[in-house]
Image: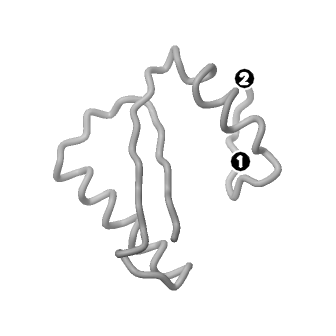
Amino acid sequence: MPHISIKGYPKNLSEAELQELSEAVCAVIREHLKTTDKSISIAYQEVEPEQWKSTVYDKEIKPALDCLLKKPGYEM
């Protein structure tokens, strides 16, 4: 049962854009993990740029560098 957590700077996406993002992510997960939409959950959270380091980078990215599928091209 995959759960995907997406965090990023505010983009003010419309409901239609969020739905399109969800569908695209689900399609990739279905294809690569051989699962169904029923088992996928996705969280989307906008984080202000000035809060990125303390709330995302320091707590989630930096401690997990060894297991990230895609590492960021920046350091903080």
| Mark 2 vs mark 1, CA separation in Å | 13 Å
Which numbered dot is residue 60? none
Mark 2 residue element: loop
Amino acid, disc 2: Met
Q: Is residue 26 above or below residue 44?
A: below
Q: Residue at x 72, y 53 (%)?
A: 68
Residue 72 % position (x, y): 68, 42
Q: Residue at x 55, y 79 (%)?
A: 32
Residue 58 % position (x, y): 70, 27
Residue 40 % position (x, y): 42, 68
Direction from residue 38 to residue 34 in the image, left or right: right
| Figure quadrant of the C terminus | top right
- Mark 1, residue position: 71
Amino acid, disc 1: Lys
Which numbered dot is residue 76? 2
Q: Residue at x 26, y 60 (%)?
A: 20
